Amino acid sequence: MVESSLLQLKNLSLSFGGLLAVNSVSLSIQEKEIWGIIGPNGAGKTTLFNILTGIYAPSRGDIIFQENNITNLTSAQRGRLGIVRTFQNIRLFKDLTVLENVLIAYHSSMVKEYSLLECLFRFPFFSFLGGAKKVKEVEKNYKEKALRLLKKFNLESKSELLAGSLSYGDQRRLEIVRALSANPKILLLDEPAAGMNPEETEALKNLLFWIREEFSVSIILIEHDMNLVLSLCEKILVMHHGNELATGSPEAIKNNPEVIKAYLGTGTSW
Amino acid sequence: MAYFSSLLAQFGIFVILATSLNLINGLTGMFCLGHAGLWAIGAYVGSAFSVFVWPSLQIDFPLLQLACSCVVAMIASGAVAFIVGVACLRLKGDYLAIATLGLGEIVKVLLTNWELVGGPRGFTGIPPISSAAVILPVAFLCLVLLLNVRYSSFGRALMSIREDELASNSLGISTTKMKIVVFVLGSSLAGLAGPLYAHEQQFLHPENFNFMASVLILLQVILGGMGSFTGSVLGVLFLLILPEVLKSLGPEIAQWRMVLYSLLLIVLMLLRPQGILGKKELGGTW
């Protein structure tokens, strides 16, 4: 490889007892690339995401992010480096408002601007310490930033609603907004189009293209909607029983006989 | 008058205890059942400092004595919480509750068997240097500090741990570290309540800090609303002051007070299962 890649997986494996959930998967993802991971249920796609985000430790193999080995970092450390994900079963902070959900993702940037002490001692009679004004200003700036971002996703008018009260599609989009606020370099989306109708899926596709340009992020998505994957992704990884069945461009994947046999099926024209 | 001032002092003490427990249980969503144990550590360590160490320093300045005693108590409770926290905070829900319940009982048993601080006879001879006049401002300060945490990025991060720890982690928030910090901070505030209480009562007994004391604090938090600090103050008013008020309403009402009190609790739990204020604060945003 001549150019260095953003994220590299080297022979990643994970077994649960005797079950090889992920078997020696290698990948190399460049900046601003959009990858798709497809495969039948139980192929190890979400497990691969869980390894990437530090929820599971791999039994073997290495994860290289921006030329650093991050295999032993915790979830939170990886989040701060810029590997941020959404979840297959939406995991919003349901009892908090939409705005708070976004602000929480700014936490690691916000704590660089004010310390716990400054935030504790903000009373009128301690104002000579400068804490009160500073905290207020930082809070205000980030709130505006969050609202601007929400506006781009048409969620601004719902910013004071509880996240759990949003419609399903809005919740999915809010989860993406929240992930984007955490300042990601690589965005992992676990079935972002699940439960969406064709129009919503089409809108999602355009949104993801826009996100890639606007935030300069690489995107990896797990998805079962083949139309979306084939039209959106530049590279596709097909998994089957934990193995890497094929990797390549949508064209190559679509015509790969092994992929057709394991996942796409015959008799359908894509 | 003495009764009234003692009641106010009690109110202040329990405001500190309930709000600090609310930081741990309500805002961060951990389930700690040993708050009275951490309070006891503060009370005994602070009093021991005041009785055994302070006289040898020969400084006659009661308020400074109380302040030093409080600082020592906070460090002691915080240190114990740190050790316990590092070991136990990987436990979740019921398991953390059992572990902290154990902590409370261990503290009580140790104090009962420690002759230096009176053992089962109780700790006597603590100088009367604390009063409602000191306790209430401290309790108010404590409430303000916690509200400052609540309405900041730190507070939101803590609530995110309560809502969904995994998601919170994935956004770059070091949840384990934050949980330990919160547990230590909340426990040292419980420690702070110790000497304030001890120097007002002038007497400590291990049985004052039994499981029921932890439960009383927890009830105040739940009744006021988990995650609402001003709610905790209302919870204290309700569970500590109301029985006293009922007692003072003449003998006919006084003999029915436990019935009335229980009825009120049942009605409240039926109408407001999320607590008096739920997750909201009195006075809106900070």
Image (cartoon, rainbow, N blue to C red):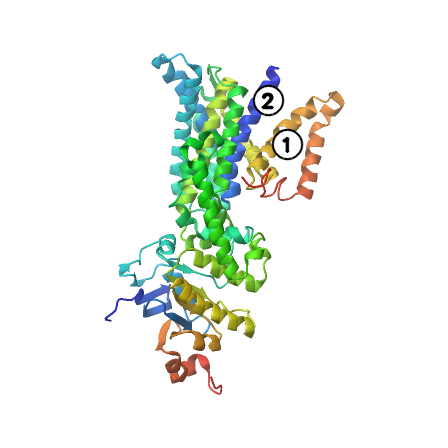
Per the image, label 2 sits on a secondary structure element best described as helix
Among all residues in the image, which is located at the extreme bottom?
A: A267
Amino acid under label 2?
Leu
Mark 1 vs mark 2: same chain? yes
Ranked by sequence position, the earlier of labels 1 and 2 is 2
Amino acid under label 1?
Phe
The x and y percentages for residue B87 are 39, 42
Per the image, label 1 sits on a secondary structure element best described as helix
Which residue position is annotated with label 1? B238
Which residue position is annotated with label 2? B7
Closer to us: B214 or A237? A237
State left or right for residue B41 relative to residue B5: left
User: Which quarter shows the N terminus of chain A?
Assistant: bottom left
- Is A31 drawn above or below residue B177 in the view shown? below
- Is A74 drawn above or below residue B57 in the view shown? below
Among all residues in the image, which is located at the extreme right?
A: B252
Closer to us: A111 or A56? A111
Among all residues in the image, which is located at the extreme left?
A: A2
Q: Quadrant of residue A170?
A: bottom right
Closer to us: B175 or B84? B175
Q: Chain of mark 1?
A: B
The x and y percentages for residue A15 are 36, 65
Let me know if residue B165 appears in the view.
no
State left or right for residue B105 relative to residue A2: right
Let me know if residue B135 appears in the view.
yes
Q: Chain of mark 2?
A: B
What residue appears at the point 62 percent right and 41 percent down from the top-left corner? B275
What residue appears at the point 61 percent right and 33 percent down from the top-left corner? B234
Q: Quadrant of residue A253?
A: bottom left
